[in-house]
Amino acid sequence: MLVSVTERTREIGIRMSVGARGRDILMQFLIEALVLSLLGGIAGILTGVGGSVAISSFAKWPIIITVFSIILSFGFSIAIGVFFGFYPAKKAAMLNPIDALRYE
């Protein structure tokens, strides 16, 4: 997310110069971080369940996947995404539009 904010500094400056508030920029990047976390959580859960099923069929081990473990892993994925997406979002919201437009 930090790299995304750095690469899109001019875009942020343009949005702010045409009237976007810091809150709008903050929400844009937080929503982006949340969506990436959701997709990553879904991919992780599918990979984990698929890997467990594959290993259990190969090794003839019983498989136990609880709803609680899926919800916990999904919630952890979202929490990490929002936590590490907040600083870059806050940094983007605090940019000065003139400096952002001048950024190369």
Image: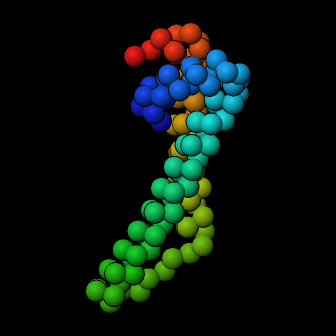
The reply to whether residue 2 is visible in this rendering is no
* Residue in the picture at 56% in, 9% down: 98
Tell me which residue sits at (42%, 69%) in the image. Answer: 48
Query: Taking 34 as reference, is 18 left or right?
Result: right
Q: Residue 99: image x %, image y %?
A: 52, 10
| Pick the front one: 72 or 78 | 78
- Choose between 22 and 102: the one closer to the eye: 102
Quarter-of-image position of residue 24: top right
Q: How many marks?
A: 0
Quarter assignment of residue 53 = bottom left
Q: Is residue 79 above or below residue 63?
A: above
Residue at 51% x, 15% y is: 101
Q: Which residue lies at the image location 57% right of the left edge and 43% below the top edge?
A: 32
Residue 70 percent coordinates (x, y): 55, 67
The quadrant of the image that shows the C terminus is top left
**Whether residue 16 is situated above or below residue 39 in the rendered picture:** above
**Whole-percent x, y for residue 3 in the image:** 42, 31
Name the outermost residue toward the left. 58
- For residue 27, which quarter of the picture? top right
In this rendering, does residue 84 appear at all?
Answer: yes
Instruction: Find residue 84 and report its horizontal and vertical position in percent.
Output: 52, 37
Q: Is residue 102 left or right of residue 71?
A: left
Instruction: Give the colour scheme of this rendering.
Output: rainbow
